[in-house]
Image: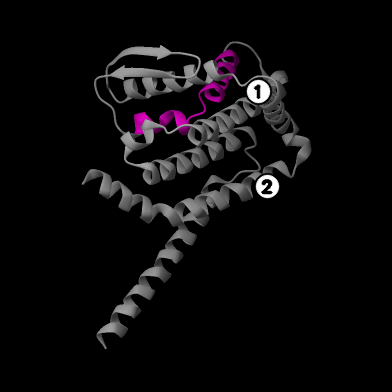
Amino acid sequence: MKNFLKLFLAFLLLPLVFFTVAEVCGTCWNVFADLQNAIGFLAGAALYAVIHFSVYQFDRMYVFGHETTHAVAAMLFGFRVHDISVKKDSGHVKMDRCNAAVILAPYFIPFYALLTGIIYVGIGLFWPVENYRSVFIFSVGFFMAFHGVQTCKTLWETQQPDLKMAGGNLFSVVMIVLGNMLVLSLVLKCLFPQRVELLEMARGVFNSTYNTWKIVINYIIDRLISAQG
């Protein structure tokens, strides 16, 4: 019954997913069109892509970040973590309980990009880091590409039991896409605050989703009335 409700929720969220992706893509275009300011981020992302597809894929590094994110998310929810295993191509976390957020967290939280931000802010508390902002942006671009490519690779190449445990493939994919779009929006806002308007993005997504469901519901009501007449 719980999985059925999650499937139904995923179906209801499909228009939201579509318009969120469209809004974030538009924002990315707005940000990256200013090549002079975005070159560092794009260069970092491009470097990772080149390394991944031609030199080395950082599999163990990804597994470590993936399993650590599971563990940290579990602890944030108050669950107890008993063991973490990290191998070259696989890993697992033993915990006393879990939920969909804990299960899906590694698929939308860019562990190394977040860690880079924490280190940058932490150093900034004790040392001026303004002169190294371009290095920071480059690093975030590198690790955001790392997260995106590795997540797609993981979901595409293997059947992940995480998706079934979280509530099924459709529900999980919907949550993963929404989570990644939200995180990407926040990352871009932090890096390019003048180019990203989160409130305007949210308003655009809400209005488009609301209007879509309004049209759908009105159509269904009209059909029902016609059938009864």
Q: Is residue 24 left or right of residue 31?
A: left
What is the x, y in percent for residue 113? 56, 24
Q: For mark 2, give the secondary structure.
A: helix
Q: CA distance from mark 1 to mark 2?
A: 20 Å
Q: Residue reaching furthest left?
A: 1
Q: Which region is colored magenta? A: 101-124
Q: Residue at x 48, y 35 (%)?
A: 155
Say whether residue 117 is magenta.
yes
The crowding category of the residue bearing disc 2, from other C-alpha atoms within 10 Å (few below 14, some 14 to 19, many at least 20), is few
Q: For mark 1, give the secondary structure.
A: helix
Q: Residue at x 72, y 35 (%)?
A: 38
What is the x, y in percent for residue 27? 62, 47
Q: Residue at x 68, y 47 (%)?
A: 30
Q: Residue at x 52, y 32 (%)?
A: 151
Q: Image height check: is 190 above or below 93?
A: below
- Camera-side residue: 39 or 11? 11
Say whether residue 190 is magenta.
no
Q: Which residue is mark 2?
A: 29
Q: Which mark is residue 217?
A: none
Q: Which mark is residue 139?
A: 1
